[in-house]
Image: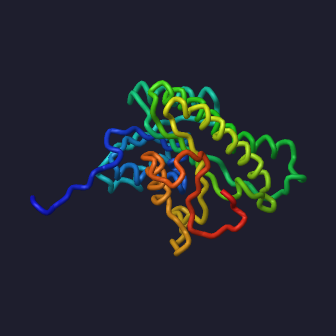
Amino acid sequence: MFGVSLKVMKLLNKVAVVAGGTGSIGEGIVRRYLQEGATVIVPSRSLSRIDSLQGYVSDITHGILASYQANIGTFLGAQEFIRNILEDHGKIDICIASIGVWWSGKSLSELSNDDWHDNITNNLHPHFYLARAVLPAMQEARSGLYVGIAGPANIMPVRKSEILAVTGAAHMKMLEAFATEMRAHAVNVYQLIVADVATRQAAREKTASSITPEEIADYTLRLYTGDVPEPSNYLQKFMRVTLPWLRI
């Protein structure tokens, strides 16, 4: 019909992995990617969380949601997960890592040995295991986008949660190294810092300064197309709240 324009889906025929896709930010990214026509793959150790995600996106008629029961918190688990995706879907165009856990209660000088190892295990190891598993496949294909998502506490120590800044600094440097390594292979690697996120799971209402998980997804799509002010800078931020100490 004349005068009617059809929406072009930006991720039609694309395969996107959203690690942490059952989480508060991840579920919004899954939702937006499905709306853009992607095949979205979500790993989880919990079938109940997968069921909850499927219910949340059941109204979307575009895209395909494929869930895998997998443990990317181990090197072998991440390798098997990516190997299964490549066998089933043949490629990975985008990988979003919205993983890690919040931790609070002790300052860095008060941490026990177990606290230290738990935080390294939960907030650093999975990022390396996932990147180490997926980036060689993107390198071979000579295309792809990998984005690690983090919050301000990963940069500036927060009282009684300083350990997050320690693992966050290591995570950022790891992604900087991967970005430098992958640039020659036409694969883009980014660290995306977000703040003041209004999520459904936290029952937070959106304000003038907050952002939503769906808007974070849209920013990653801009990274995918190179439509950001500094596309060559591996360290990106997307936020409306003013954080004077955040210098990136």
Relative depth, front residue between 199 and 14: 14
Relative depth, front residue between 53 and 78: 78
Relative depth, front residue between 22 and 245: 245
Residue 20 in the image: state x and y as whole percent.
55, 46
Q: How is the image coloured?
A: rainbow
Relative depth, front residue between 237 and 202: 237
Residue 45 in the image: state x and y as whole percent.
56, 40
Q: Is residue 41 left or right of residue 71?
A: left
Where 173 sits versus 88, above or below? below
- Residue at x-position 38% and y-position 54%: 57
Q: In the rendered view of the protein, which quadrant contains the N terminus? A: bottom left
Q: In the rendered view of the protein, which quadrant contains the C terminus? A: bottom right
- Residue at x-position 76% and y-position 43%: 118
Residue 52 appears in the figure: no
Q: Residue furthest right?
A: 109
Residue 215 in the image: state x and y as whole percent.
47, 60
Residue 132 appears in the figure: yes
Q: Which residue lies furthest to the left in this view?
A: 1
Q: Is residue 80 left or right of residue 115?
A: left
- Residue at x-position 37% and y-position 41%: 39
Where 37 sits versus 15, above or below? below
Give the number of callouts.
Answer: 0
